[in-house]
Image (tube, rainbow, N blue to C red):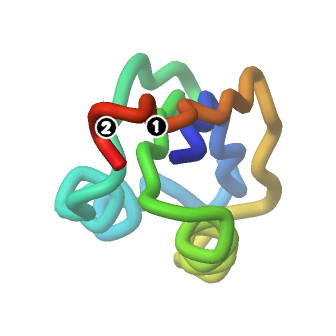
Amino acid sequence: MPISGLVVVLDAPNGPFLGTLQALRGHAAIDVGEITDNHIAIVVDSTSNQHDQEIWQWVQELPGVLDIRIAFVGFDEATSEEQ
């Protein structure tokens, strides 16, 4: 399961993007962290590589999102007991 620590960069002069922040907070696979100026720290805990890519694409298409910066990506491998 991929876990990504990301920074969402917003188009600050045209903000605030309250709908974008609400959408991020409402997504089941996303935890919203610190918010500073036009940066929102998020953690994405997805079920597969494909799901991870779908979430990244969804975030990129939200209103006001200029960029997604990667802080961390990890792959939590299932143990033999979980399989």
Judging by the rendered image, the residue that carries numbered circle 2 is 31
Residue sitting nearer the eye, 82 or 72: 82
Q: Residue at x 31, y 37 (%)?
A: 31
Q: Residue at x 32, y 55 (%)?
A: 29
Which residue is depicted at the point 46% across and 37% down? Answer: 78
Depth check: 64 or 76 in front?
76
Which of the 4 quarters of the picture holds residue 73?
top right
Circle on res. 78: 1
Ranked by sequence position, the earlier of labels 2 and 1 is 2
Crowd band around label 1 with a 10 angstrom C-alpha radius: few (<14), some (14–19), many (20+): few
Question: Against 22, is 58 above or below?
Answer: below
Foreground of the two, 67 or 72: 72
Q: Visible in this render: residue 67?
A: yes
Front disc: 2 or 1:
1
Q: What is the crowding at mark 2: few (fewer than 14 residues within 10 Å), some, or many (at least 20)?
A: some
- At which x and y percent is residue 53? 69, 70
- Residue 39 seen in the current view: no
Q: Going by the image, does 38 lie left or right of 33?
A: right
36 sits to left or right of 70: left
Choose top left, top right, bottom left or bottom right for residue 35: top left
The Cα atoms of the two marked residues, 2 and 1, are separated by 21 Å
Amino acid type at mark 1: Ala
